[in-house]
Image (cartoon, rainbow, N blue to C red):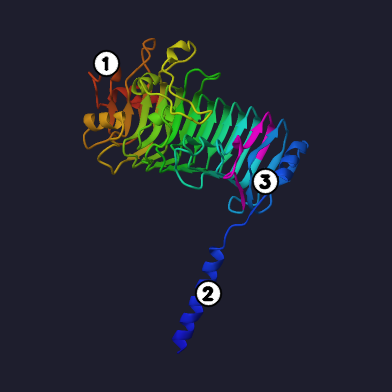
C-alpha cells in the first residue's frame, strides 16, 4: 500500500511537470513600441528587452545611432521571431552605427538574414542565439549573424543554426574577433570573407557542411588577409549541402573541416580537426572553384546578398585567385571515416586519388604563375595524410609527400617565432 502511494505521488508530479512543459507558447507583440524606441534612442542609451516570446512582421531597424545597447534577459528567455514576416528581408538590421552592443536574446526565422549589421564602427554581438527553428532547409535565410562592411567586430558566446549559407559570417570587415561560439546545422559554420585582421578562436563548429571558411572572392570592394584560426574544435562537419545552386558555398563538399580559398597571410594553429569525412583542411584557388562550377546557373529566387560563383573573375584585375603564405601549425587531425562524400566532384576525386584514406590536408596545387613559392607551410601537425593534387596539370604530378611544405625542416628558425 505504501509503495502504491509513492508510485501515485511520483506519477502525479510527473503529470504536473509534463503539463507545464507542454503548455503552449504565448506570443506577444511589441513591434510598434520597440521600433519607436530604436528610432528615438539617444546616444548611450540601453534598451531592455523583456522576458517572453515576441512576434514581428517587418524588419526592425536601428540606424545612425551611437553607443546604444539592446539587451534581453537571456537567449532562453527573450525570443524574437520573424516567422510571420511580411515586409523586409532582415529580422534585425543595424546600420551606420558606432559602438553598438546587442546581447542576451534569441532571434529566429527571418525571411532573409536574421541579424545584419552594415557599415558600423564597433559592434558587439554577445550571447545571441540566431536560428531557423525548422532545422536546416534550403528555404532558410542565408546568414544568422551577418556583419558586413564593419570595423571592430566582436562576436562571442553566440549560437548560430540553420543558415543556408553561413551561420556566423563577416564580410569585407576590418579587425574582427570571433570567439567562444557554437555553430551547427549550417552550410558553413563560420566564414570570414574578404576581411582583414580576423581572429577566430575557442569556437565549437560541428555538423555543418563545412566547418570554418576563410575566403577571398572577386568583384567586391575590399579584399582580405591576415586571418588567424586557432584553438577551435572543428568536428563532424558532414551535413548534406543545402545551399541554393549557384551560391559559392554550394561548391563545398560535405565533410569539409576547414577551407582556405584564395586568401593570403593566414595562420591555422592548435585546432582539433576531427571526423570531417572528406578533408580535414583544404587549401584551394578560385581557379578550381570556377572550373568545378562551370555551366551551373543560379537557382531562381536565390537569397539576396549571397555570393555566387563568378566565372569572369579574371576581369577583376585587383583580385588574386591564388592562396599564398598559409601556415598550418600544430593542429591535431583524426578521421574515423574511410570514404569522403561521394555526391560531389571533389569527393569523388579524393576517393579516387586517396582510396580508403581521405586526406587530413589537401592542396589543389594551383599556384600563382607570378609567384615562385606559394609559401604553404606545414609544421608539427603530427602524422597526417596529405595530398597535393597538382590540379593545374590535370593531376599529372599528384603527390602525397608533405616534405616540400614542411616549413620547420626548411627553416628551423621559424619555430622560434611561434
For mark 2, does the 10 Å Cα neighbourhood hold few (<14), some (14 to 19), or many (20 or more) residues? few
The disc placed on residue 393 is: 1
Q: Where 191 sits versus 180, above or below?
A: above
For mark 3, does the 10 Å Cα neighbourhood hold few (<14), some (14 to 19), or many (20 or more) residues? many
Q: Magenta region's main secondary structure?
A: strand
Q: How many marks?
A: 3
Check disc 3 and report the residue beneath it: 71
Which residue lies at the image location 56% right of the left edge and 63% below the top edge?
Answer: 23
Q: Which residues are magenta?
A: 78-101
Regarding residue 330, the answer to whether it shows in the image is no
- Where is residue 269 shown, x and y percent of the image? 42, 34
The disc placed on residue 82 is: none
- Where is residue 59 shown, x and y percent of the image? 64, 37
Regarding residue 238, the answer to whether it shows in the image is yes
Q: Marks 1 and 2, how far apart in space? A: 70 Å
Check disc 2 and report the residue beneath it: 13
- Where's the C terminus, which quadrant? top left
Please state if 20 lies on the left or on the right of 268 as rendered. right
Please state if 245 lies on the left or on the right of 95 as rendered. left
Amino acid at each position: 500500500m505504501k509503495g502504491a502511494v509513492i508510485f501515485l505521488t511520483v506519477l502525479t508530479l510527473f503529470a504536473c511537470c509534463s503539463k507545464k512543459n507542454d503548455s503552449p507558447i504565448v506570443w506577444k507583440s511589441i513591434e510598434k513600441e520597440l521600433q519607436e524606441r530604436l528610432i528615438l534612442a539617444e546616444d548611450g542609451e540601453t534598451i531592455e528587452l523583456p522576458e517572453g516570446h515576441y512576434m514581428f512582421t517587418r524588419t526592425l531597424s536601428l540606424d545612425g545611432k551611437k553607443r546604444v545597447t539592446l539587451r534581453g534577459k537571456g537567449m532562453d528567455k527573450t525570443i524574437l521571431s520573424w516567422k510571420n514576416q511580411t515586409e523586409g528581408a532582415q529580422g534585425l538590421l543595424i546600420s551606420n552605427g558606432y559602438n553598438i552592443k546587442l546581447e542576451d536574446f534569441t532571434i529566429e526565422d527571418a525571411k532573409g538574414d536574421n541579424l545584419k549589421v552594415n557599415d558600423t564602427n564597433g559592434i558587439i554581438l554577445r550571447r545571441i542565439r540566431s536560428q531557423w527553428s525548422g532545422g536546416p532547409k534550403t528555404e532558410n535565410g542565408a546568414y544568422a549573424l551577418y556583419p558586413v562592411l564593419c570595423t571592430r567586430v566582436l562576436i562571442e558566446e553566440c549560437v548560430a543554426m540553420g543558415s543556408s549559407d553561413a551561420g556566423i559570417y563577416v564580410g569585407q570587415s576590418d579587425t574582427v574577433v570571433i570567439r567562444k561560439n557554437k555553430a551547427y546545422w549550417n552550410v558553413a559554420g563560420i566564414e570570414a570573407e574578404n576581411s582583414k585582421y580576423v581572429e577566430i578562436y575557442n569556437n565549437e563548429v560541428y555538423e555543418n557542411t563545412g566547418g570554418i571558411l576563410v575566403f577571398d572572392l572577386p568583384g567586391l570592394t575590399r579584399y582580405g588577409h591576415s586571418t588567424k584560426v586557432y584553438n577551435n574544435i572543428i568536428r563532424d562537419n558532414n551535413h548534406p549541402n543545402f545551399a541554393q545552386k549557384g551560391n559559392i558555398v554550394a561548391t563545398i563538399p560535405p565533410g569539409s573541416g576547414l577551407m582556405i580559398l584564395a586568401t593570403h597571410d593566414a595562420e591555422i594553429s592548435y585546432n582539433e580537426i576531427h571526423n570531417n569525412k572528406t578533408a580535414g583542411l583544404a587549401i584551394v584557388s578560385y581557379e578550381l572553384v570556377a572550373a568545378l562550377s562551370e555551366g551551373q546557373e543560379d537557382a531562381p529566387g536565390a537569397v539576396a546578398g549571397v555570393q555566387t560563383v563568378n566565372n569572369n573573375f579574371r576581369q577583376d584585375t585587383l583580385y588574386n585567385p591564388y592562396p599564398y603564405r598559409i601556415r598550418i601549425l600544430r593542429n591535431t587531425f583524426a578521421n574515423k571515416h574511410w570514404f569522403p562524400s561521394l555526391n560531389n566532384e571533389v569527393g569523388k576525386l579524393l576517393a579516387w586519388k586517396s582510396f580508403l584514406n581521405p586526406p587530413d590536408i589537401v592542396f589543389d596545387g594551383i599556384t600563382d604563375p607570378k609567384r615562385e613559392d606559394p609559401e604553404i607551410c606545414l609544421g608539427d601537425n603530427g602524422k597526417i595524410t596529405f595530398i597535393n593534387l597538382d590540379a593545374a596539370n590535370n593531376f599529372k604530378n599528384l603527390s602525397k609527400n608533405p616534405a616540400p611544405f614542411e616549413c620547420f625542416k626548411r627553416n628551423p628558425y621559424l619555430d622560434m617565432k611561434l
